[in-house]
Each structure stands twice: as structure tokens, then as C-alpha cells.
Image (cartoon, rainbow, N blue to C red):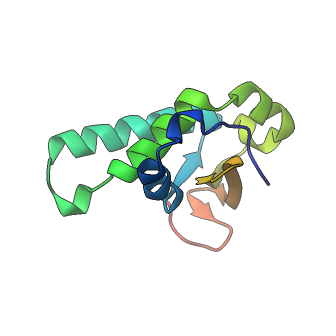
Amino acid sequence: MRGVGTMDALQNDRWEDAVTTEQVVLRLDGGCIETAARRELQRLIVAALAAPGDPEVDSARQIALLGEFVRTADFRALRATRPELAGDHDLEVSVRLVPGVGYEVEVLDRVEDGHTAEGRRQK
């Protein structure tokens, strides 16, 4: 299901190509999608600053995607149209940019007691 967002700031093809190939997985555990996106963006920035040039921490594309998502998404509308993203349930969701459309937010899994429905242990 498509989320609510805009791509106005990503008109440059280079940025669009870089961002559209990425997806960011967010864990909604006690917060809504906006809170999860802001927390993950902060975590990625801190990790990138702590290890500049480290290929293991090459998160520039994810930072670009999440930064644009946090800056431009209409979170109120997103939560209204997708109540499961309001933070009432522990969920794992993916966010990716779809050229010409906006953001796609997909629920990947429900998390219960630190495990997904598939049984993977969550960090």
C-alpha cells in the first residue's frame, strides 16, 4: 500500500536513482512511524559520523531516503489512512521511494515479545 509523501526535492536523477534502490526497515515499538523514522535517521547519522569512510557503515543512501521521508511525508495523513502505523502494535515496516508516486510503506511483520511472527529474534 502506498504511503503519503512527495518527491519534490528529489528531481535530480542522480539522487532519485540512489534513493529508489534503497529501502529502510523500521521497527515500530512503542512509537508511530514518524517516531521510528526519526529515531532510525538519528541512529544512522550517529553511526556514519562515528565511522567515516567505513564501508560497513555506508548508510548515505538510507540517510538520504529517511531524511527526505521525515522532511516531506504527511505523517498525520499516513497514520489516519494506515492506523497500524500509529504505534499501537510492534511492527516491522519497510519504507522506500517509488519514482513518480511517493513513498511506499509496507508492513513486513508483527513483532511479539521480541520475535517476529516468523520467529526471528529482533534487535
Residue 55 in view of the camera: yes
Using the image as rendered, state which of residue 68 and residue 93 is in the foreground. Answer: 68
Q: Which residue, as the protein is rendered here, is positioned at the far right?
A: 81
Using the image as rendered, state which of residue 55 and residue 86 is in the foreground. Answer: 55
Residue 103 image position (x, y, % from top left): 66, 47
Residue at the spot x=43%, y=56% of the render?
18
Residue 102 image position (x, y, % from top left): 68, 45
The number of discs equals: 0
Residue 31 in view of the camera: no
Residue at the spot x=76%, y=35% of the render?
78
Task: Tell me if residue 67 comes above or below residue 14 in the rendering.
Answer: above
Q: Which residue, as the protein is rendered here, is positioned at the far front?
A: 12
> Which of the 4 image quadrants contains residue 29?
top right
Position of residue 68 in the picture relative to residue 46 (left or right): right
Using the image as rendered, state which of residue 97 and residue 10 is in the foreground. Answer: 10
> Which of the 4 image quadrants contains residue 1?
bottom right
Residue 54 image position (x, y, % from top left): 15, 57
Residue at the spot x=14%, y=53% of the render?
53
Residue at the spot x=75%, y=25% of the render?
76
Which quarter shows the C terminus? bottom left
